[in-house]
């Protein structure tokens, strides 16, 4: 789940990037009690391609030819396996928003042979435009930095939050990107927008604060935890 950043009673905060779905699923599949090393017994095959992570905050976003070449190599390798050629179920992950990968990853014809898990599914208009109507996709929750240390911790911690004296009721940590009308409406409701640390913005005497973050800086977790 990433490096431990903070611990408080029954919760711990790890450096779990919100786009770390590739890594998390890989570890969960590897540790699953249903895992088998005998391919003839397998009902589903996992492909640890890490395509979403590879395209996050990297130069590959500006180098479509190189990315396309890597995807071609991936499917050339998969085609050497008999179970892939027999079209047995193969699943992978895409730790990015689906609509952001249409022209890079999902455009490859081999991708249609995979069922994949992603954190956000594109709307029907986009899926129709890229002929993805029959593409099998499973939507998973965004990975969270906060992890409960027991199954009962969620209710206990909720009670703590209700009685805790806080001068900020709602904190939104997000970029100013207006990627859809719902996001724009939510961002518009925050009067206070800041890039300052907690100690600097807590004196704003507002019950709602938006902390403006930059996706690829990789340091915003240190300003949100407090």
Image (cartoon, rainbow, N blue to C red):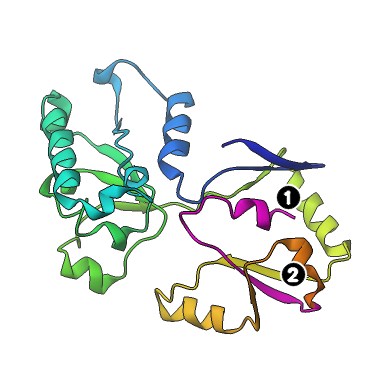
In the shown orientation, is residue 108 left or right of residue 136? left
Could you tell me if residue 172 is visible in this image?
yes
Residue farthest toward the top in the current orientation of the protein: 38
Q: Where in the figure is residue 187, as x and y percent of width and height?
A: 55, 78
On whether residue 208 falls in the magenta region, the answer is yes
Residue in view at x 50 percent, y 51 percent: 18
Q: Earlier in the sequence, mark 1 or mark 2?
A: 1
What span is in magenta? 205-226
- Element under disc 1: helix
**The disc label shown at residue 154, or none:** 1
In the shown orientation, is residue 68 left or right of residue 149? left
Q: Where in the figure is residue 198, as x and y percent of width and height?
A: 74, 62
In the shown orientation, is residue 46 left or right of residue 206? left
Badge 2 density bin: few <14, some 14–19, many ≥20, Cα 10 Å? some
Badge 1 density bin: few <14, some 14–19, many ≥20, Cα 10 Å? some
Residue 176 vs 115, above or below: the answer is below
**The disc label shown at residue 10, or none:** none
Label tally: 2
Mark pair 1, 2: CA separation: 28 Å
Whether the residues at callouts 1 and 2 have beta carbons within 8 Å, the answer is no
Residue in view at x 51 percent, y 68 percent: 175
Q: Where in the figure is residue 57, as x and y percent of width and height?
A: 38, 51
Residue in view at x 19 percent, y 60 percent: 132
On whether residue 80 falls in the magenta region, the answer is no
- Element under disc 2: helix
Q: Nearer the viewer, residue 46 or 20?
A: 20
Q: Nearer the viewer, residue 226 or 83?
A: 226
**The disc label shown at residue 201, or none:** 2
Could you tell me if residue 151 is visible in this image?
no
């Amino acid at each position: 789940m990433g490096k431990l950043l903070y611990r408080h009673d029954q919760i711990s905060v790890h450096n779990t990037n919100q786009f770390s779905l590739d890594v998390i699923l890989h570890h969960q599949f590897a540790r699953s009690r249903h895992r088998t090393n005998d391919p003839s017994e397998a009902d589903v095959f996992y492909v640890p391609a890490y395509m979403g992570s590879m395209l996050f905050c990297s130069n590959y976003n500006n180098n479509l030819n190189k990315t396309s070449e890597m995807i071609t190599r991936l499917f050339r390798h998969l085609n050497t396996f008999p179970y892939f050629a027999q079209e047995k179920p193969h699943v992978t992950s895409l730790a990015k928003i689906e609509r952001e990968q249409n022209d890079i990853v999902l455009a490859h014809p081999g991708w249609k042979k995979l069922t994949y898990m992603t954190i956000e599914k594109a709307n029907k208009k986009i899926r129709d435009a890229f002929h993805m109507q029959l593409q099998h996709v499973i939507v998973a929750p965004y990975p969270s930095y906060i992890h409960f240390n027991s199954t009962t911790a969620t209710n206990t911690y909720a009670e703590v939050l209700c009685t805790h004296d806080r001068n900020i009721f709602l904190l939104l940590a997000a970029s100013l990107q207006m990627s859809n009308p719902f996001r724009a409406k939510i961002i518009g409701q925050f009067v206070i927008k800041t890039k300052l640390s907690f100690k600097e913005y807590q004196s704003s005497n507002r019950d709602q604060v938006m902390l403006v973050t930059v996706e690829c800086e990789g340091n915003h977790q240190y300003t949100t935890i407090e």
